[in-house]
Amino acid sequence: DTGVSQNPRHKITKRGQNVTFRCDPISEHNRLYWYRQTLGQGPEFLTYFQNEAQLEKSRLLSDRFSAERPKGSFSTLEIQRTEQGDSAMYLCAVGRSSGNTIYFGEGSWLTVV
Amino acid sequence: KNQVEQSPQSLIILEGKNCTLQCNYTVSPFSNLRWYKQDTGRGPVSLTIMTFSENTKSNGRYTATLDADTKQSSLHITASQLSDSASYICVVSELIKAAGNKLTFGGGTRVLVKP
C-alpha cells in the first residue's frame, strides 16, 4: 500500500456519460500526476500538478478531459461524454519536490459500454 | 522524441531460474531511471531508482544496472518465484526545471514464472 488512494477502483459507464475519478495523495507530496494505461501498454502521461497549479497537459488530454487540484491536496480527473476509446486504467502518482521517489495509486478502471 | 524501449515484450521462465530484462532509452536530459513491478490490475510499485552516477542497485532478488553512456539499463531477477509474475516497467525521468521529473514509460516486459 503506497498510501495513494484512488476512487472508484472500477467504473462501468455508458457511452456519452460523464465520469469523475478522485486521487487522495500522501500528505506533503506536492507533485501529482495522472496517467492512462491500456491493457498490455505502459502508462501514458496525461497531466501534472505542482501543488494546485496544473503545469503540464499532454495532447492526449482532449477537451473532454479536465483535471483539478483545488487545494493542492486531492485531485479529480473528469471525462465528459465518454467514448469507448476512453476505456483504460487511470493512474494517479505523487512525489515531492525534494525527492525522486514517485508513488502510484492502485488505479481506477474505466469501462465504457 | 524521448523514448524508452524494453525487451523482450514477454518471457516465460521456470521457478528458481534467473532472467534479465533490458531497457534502452533516448530521454534527455536524463535525471534518473526507475524500474517498477506491476501486478495485473494494480498500480506500479517501485523496485529501484538510479541516478546518473549509479551503476547498479539491488532490492532483494532484483538487481538493476545502468550504463548512462550507452543509455541502457537491465533488471536481473535471481532465483525467480511464482510471485515475480508481473509486468516490469522501465521509467526514465527527464529533468524539467519548472515541472520536476517528467516520466517516460517503457511498454513493459511481461514475466510469467511457471512452477
Image: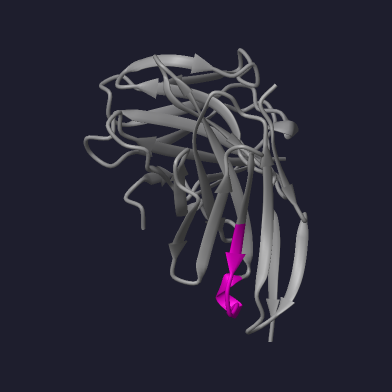
Residue at 65% across / 21% down in the picture?
A60
The foreground one among B86 and A3 is B86
The foreground one among A74 and A51 is A51
Residue at 76% across / 60% down in the picture?
B10
> Where does the magenta region start and end?
B75-84
Q: Position of residue B2 (x, y in %)?
A: 66, 26
Q: Position of residue A105 (x, y in %)?
A: 43, 47
Q: Position of residue B115 (x, y in %)?
A: 68, 87
Q: Position of residue B11 (x, y in %)?
A: 76, 66
Residue A43 drawn above or below residue A49: below
Q: Is residue B92 left or right of residue A101?
A: right
Q: How many marks?
A: 0
Image quarter (top left, top right, bottom left or bottom right) of the N terminus of chain B? top right
Q: Is residue B111 left or right of residue A105?
A: right
Camera sees residue B108: no
Q: Quarter of the image holding residue A62?
A: top right
Q: Quarter of the image holding residue B51?
A: top left
